[in-house]
Image (cartoon, rainbow, N blue to C red):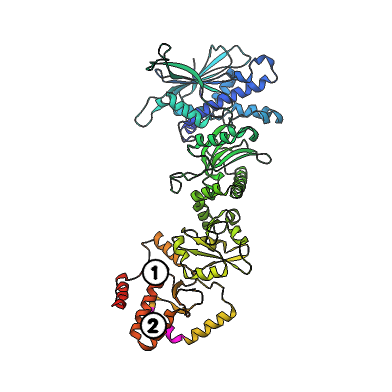
Amino acid sequence: MEKQQFKAESKRLLDLMINSIYTHQEIFLREIVSNASDAIDKLAYLSLTDQNVGLSRSDFAIRIETDAENKLLTVSDNGIGMSREEMEENLGTIAKSGSLQFKQDMDEKSKEDVDIIGQFGVGFYSAFMVAEAVTVISRKYGSEEAWMWQSSGADGYTLTACEKDAPGTDVIMKLKADTEDEKYGRFLEEYELRSLIKKYSDYIRYPIKMEVEKRRATEETKDSDKPEFETYTEVETLNSMVPLWQRSKQDVTAEEYNQFYKDKFYDFEDPVASLHLSVEGTVEYKALLYVPARAPYDYYTKDFKRGLQLYSSGVMIMENCADLLPEHFRFVKGVVDSQDLSLNISRELLQHDRQLKFIAQNLEKRIKSELEKLQKDDREKYEKFFASFGRQLKYSLASGYGAHQDTLQDLMLFWSRSQDKLVTLREYADAMPEGQEKIYFAAGESRDRLNRLPQMDLLQDKGYDVLLFTEDVDEFIPQTLRQYDGHDFQNIASGDLGLSSDDEKKDIEQKTEAAKPTLDFVKETLGEAVKEVRLSAELGGHPVCMKPEEGMSFEMEKYFQRMSPEMPAMKSGRILELNPAHPVFEALQLAVAQDQEKAKKYCQILHAQALLMADLPLEDPTAYTDLICSFLN
């Protein structure tokens, strides 16, 4: 029996097939099972016109058998089989795909009804990643002859006549011996095989069967309090075959959607939303997407992997296809199944093409629409979702320089001081009273602290609501959006609130002129600690406050300091504002005129109080305490 050489570029090409194209050894089982599915598809297609096939759809199956003693793993099918010429052509020529040729020979209408997975003719050779030798026994449908192909790799193959009872193909893999680094024997273990079929081939359209070991109470003791158990074997179907996303929406219950999600993505809690899509047109695909109720433990770490599971004709191609999800919707779980994608030769990676971009863009729109629907129809669920993933949406909006503004701005929720609940920007704008021109917000570490800001009293008197920002990222959103519905954003703790009438502005100007000696004295006393000292009519019943110079708020200053504590601190200029209508200012003016040493202490106290109200650190807390105590003696 003469050994024949491969028709392709022999050893170097086969080494490339085995060692470079596939990144995971376990892929071999997916490829062999996919080939078996293709073979059955061909015979099933032939049975539509050939009554002699004698098999119905329920008769087709793929079988897996193990022989641990001899380290043999066999994958069998009752598909169309191969003749000697086909075995030599398809197995003797690397990168020759009989499945691709079969599909090319079909008419257009038939192509729509039959899914052929194999395209490149290299999947079979992945078996050599785990096997030291491979034997293929095949009998072509309509022939009485069977042939056996054997190879140990790149040194070539033999092809001999043999016996086989029925049409179909057996792929018998003699696994390599275990090493310290590689445990090839695991591919003979029931648990491992179950896991790989579930992971990669669960939705192959034909049953994948294997004899499994089970336990049961013996017949004699099954009714006793202490039954004895025996082991037995039973042929079991390992795959579910028909994926949920391939079924019609009308045929799937909410309970089935939720259970699929929990089983598939290992969550104990129902998702807050599910989205079942079947898209036809330029690119056809089906998808089943889920919005989880809460973030997984590693969601905000670098270890989290975003992406959807990608299938092609029921075979999983990628575990996490990140290109199908934008970063702002990275929390979405689900599957996408399409025959229209351009797969690369290993079927592990994806060519970046227009089909992929089309699906990704369409999914983004549908996810946004589903979240808006949830926000409108079930606010409680939406707020639960936002508690887990709102920070993700906020960071995506702020970090994109407005690139995702249209997608994300109406998904935001912020706490409303007036309504005492979370509201959207749309809801805030719709509730604005006549005459309000700006969207007011305050940023700080807690709502309680923000509610005590001096400017709150004035805004409350006007009937204007204030959004309370308590997360680091919140304050970056107004800078990104700049406007919403034609209204500018205004931080109440910085800049002009725009609430003073012309008469009030003129009154402050006059009071400022009259109080110039006092303001100059305060500035001279505090020196470089403040950039400016001025009067304000926006402090309500408070005597003093500290405002940042235009450009960077105090909250941003603290944020940057936390992010880079080793860097020189970036500080906003401090502007001390005094309330000319408060008795304390009157006392300050009197002290400046009569007792300037006491006036200096007043200045230091007011400066320290303004820093504390702005949640800024005191340079010397002990000196401030001593200063207060000096007034108590």
When the figure is inspected, residue 211 is found, relative to residue 607, above or below; the finding is above
**Where residue 344 sits: x, y (%)?**
56, 37
Q: Which residues are magenta?
A: 515-527
Please provide percent x and percent y for residue 220.
Answer: 41, 11
Q: Which residue is mark 2?
A: 524
- Looking at the rendered structure, the secondary structure element under dot 2 is helix
User: Mainly helix, strand or loop, the magenta region?
Assistant: helix
Spatial CA distance of label 2 from label 1 is: 21 Å
Q: Nearer the viewer, residue 176 or 497?
A: 497
**Residue type, mark 2 in image:** Glu
The answer to whether any part of residue 331 appears in the image is yes
Measuring 61% from the left and 68% from the top, which residue is drawn there? 437
From the image, state whether disc 2 or disc 1 is nearer to you.
1
Q: Residues within 10 Å of mark 1 (few under 14, many from 20)?
A: some
Q: Which residue is mark 1?
A: 612
Q: Amino acid at mark 1?
A: Leu
Is residue 10 visible in this depiction of the protein?
Answer: no
Q: Nearer the viewer, residue 480 or 1?
A: 480
Q: Residue at x 52, y 43 (%)?
A: 292
Q: Position of residue 345 (x, y in %)?
A: 55, 35
